[in-house]
Every structure is written in C-alpha cells, then in structure tokens.
Amino acid sequence: MGIASLVLGIIAIVIGIVSAGLFGWLGAILAIIGIILGAVGRKNPEKSGISTAGLVCSIIGLILCLIFYLACAACVGGLGTL
C-alpha cells in the first residue's frame, strides 16, 4: 500500500506541475487514492515510513493539482469578459 501511495503521489505531483491545469482533475483523483492508500498503509509498522512519504507526496500533489486547476479555470473564465 505504501509503494502504491508513493507512486500515485509522485504521478499527481508531475501531472500537477506539467499539465498546468489541463488534467488537474486526473491528478487530484490519483492523489486522493494515494492519500487513502497511504493512510491504510501506515497501519503496517514495518512500512510506515514509505507510507508516510506516499501520504505526504499525495497531499502535495492534491494541493498542486487543485491550485493549478482552479487558476486555469479562472484564466479561462476571465477570457470571457474581454
């Protein structure tokens, strides 16, 4: 669970940075799944470190994806007023 959470968190961060809002919803969904897997994976004391890293990466990826998605939506919405 921890490795899957870490992988999903890293993918969400990459999608959040590279796509700049285009696929922000996809990155946000992956990050939410990563957060769930990271929280469940922390129950295993042997792999709690990697689960914590996955949880942190997923949270950062979720924040990035949502901020860039909202910024992109605001820019597109602002074009309609010109």
Image: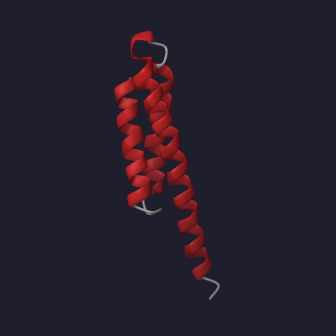
- Residue drawn at x 58%, y 82% is 79
> 30 and 7: which one is in front?
7
Farthest residue to the right: give it: 81
Where residue 76 appears, x then y in whole percent? 55, 74
> In the rendered view, how is the structure colored?
secondary structure
- Residue drawn at x 60%, y 82% is 80
How many marks the image carries: the answer is: 0
Where residue 3 appears, x then y in whole percent? 34, 27
Q: In the figure, 66 relative to 30: above or below?
A: below
Where residue 6 appears, x then y in whole percent? 38, 33
**Based on the displayed image, in which of its 4 quarters is residue 2 positioned?**
top left
> 22 and 44: which one is in front?
44
Farthest residue to the top: give it: 45
Where residue 33 appears, x then y in whole percent? 46, 35
Q: In the figure, 72 relative to 8: above or below?
A: below
> 79 and 45: which one is in front?
45
- Residue drawn at x 48%, y 53% is 25
The quadrant of the rendering that contains the C terminus is bottom right
- Residue drawn at x 38%, y 59% is 18
Q: In the figure, 78 relative to 28: above or below?
A: below
The quadrant of the rendering that contains the N terminus is top left
